[in-house]
Image (cartoon, rainbow, N blue to C red):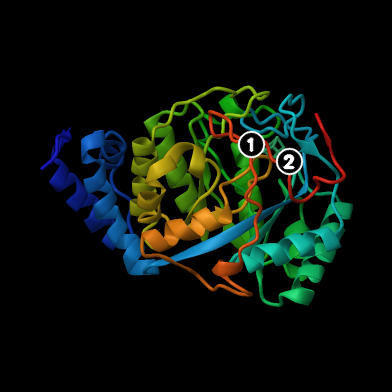
Amino acid sequence: MGTTETTQGSLEELLSRCSDAAQRREPPSRADALAVLGASDEDTLAVVSAAARFRRESFGNTVKLNYLVNVRSGLCPEDCNYCSQRRGSEAGILTYDNVGADVVAEAVGRAVDSGAARVCLVASGRGPSERDIEHMAESVMAVHDVHPGLEVCACLGILGEGQAEQLADAGVFAYNHNLNTSESHYGEICSTHGYDDRVETVDRAREAGLSPCSGALFGMGESDDDIVDVAHGLRELAPDSVPLNFLIPIDGTPMAGRRELTPQRCLRILALYRFMFPDTEIRIAGGREVHLRSVQGLGLELANSIFVGDYLTTEGQDANADLDLLADWGFVPLEIDGPGAADATVPTARSRRDDGVRIRRRGVGAGSSSTH
Ligand code: SF4
């Protein structure tokens, strides 16, 4: 079976060991995790098939649709190399301060109409000020006035003492803060905060009763060992959901033009994370269209959650294309509320560039922002 040989036998034996470990809710050995990442392209379908069993066992054929609202864009003092909102960014993105709660609620309404089961309200910056926390509270209240019970996830950066509790009191359901990469690689992607800051924030969110959401970002020069390490770091945080991002190499950032990923490599990473998190929500986040491209359906055999609509500063594919993708692969959106798939209203106009990266010019903040 296949061409991938490990030091401990055939691909079939490797996948059997990984599956047995996942069945026990244990991670695969480091050697086996590295072997999954190092499997040949020819064997990748077999790797996907073995890991996909756990996705189907836990989530059936459902896909949770999430929607991002960038409530404040750009001008961040931090220097994350992958981020178009970092200080000194020359990415030409939309920049604006906190948009009004009414603008947030309106965007969320469109998302719900497109089938979103969770909305993620994201603000650029190192961490929230008291004013930002109040703004988030107002926004959540405005959202829940129209869609009571809708899951709201906040993503506001590093949380100070007591801020997670304030967000929980305001009705925030989940908090996202990604580890992004391994502790040993973290210094290569950011100098203004560290891995430990991120761990502490996820801990604070969980301790305050917020549903912890934390994941990783790939394609930033990390080694296979880094990919395994950050998976172990995430397991220690026991997140309820794990967003997996694939670098969108935006012009004007230090990582512009970086193209390390292939669709098959993305699938192997997703498969490894499914073995590591057999019954945890895994979301394919940024970079799905850019890197998985025509194998997005196979990605859904591993992940059970995606974002619909646009990303923070770049455009995603049309929501109808996402819904077609689900239907073509026999998946159904989880908890559709509102008019549903047939009425999805995300604009179809786009200015596709050859590399598939499109700076967002529409949606929240587009009418009142500047670009830089
Ligand atoms: S990832 Fe967040 S903290 Fe880092 S530069 Fe971007 S907006 Fe700022």
Point 73% across, 34% down: residue: 85
Name the quarter where the N terminus is drawn. top left
Task: State the image quarter where residue 336 is shown.
Answer: bottom right
Residue 361, numbered circle: 2
- Contact between marks 2 and 1 (CB within 8 A): the answer is yes
Point 25% across, 45% down: residue: 45
Mark pair 2, 1: CA separation: 10 Å
Residue labelled with disc 1: 351
Q: Callout 2: 10 Å neighbours few (<14), some, many (20+)?
A: some
Between 353 and 313, the residue placed more toward the observer is: 353
Answer yes or no: is residue 209 visible.
no
Task: State the image quarter where residue 145 is shown.
Answer: bottom right
Q: Nearer the viewer, mark 2 or mark 1?
A: 1
Point 40% across, 55% down: residue: 300
Of labels 2 and 1, earlier in sequence is 1
Answer yes or no: is residue 94 visible.
yes
Name the quarter where the C terminus is drawn. top right
Amino acid type for the residue under numbered disc 1: Ser
Amino acid type for the residue under numbered disc 2: Arg
- Farthest front residue in view: 349
Q: Position of residue 235 (x, y in %)?
A: 45, 52
On the rendering, which quadrant does ligand 1 occupy?
Answer: top right
Number of marks in picture: 2
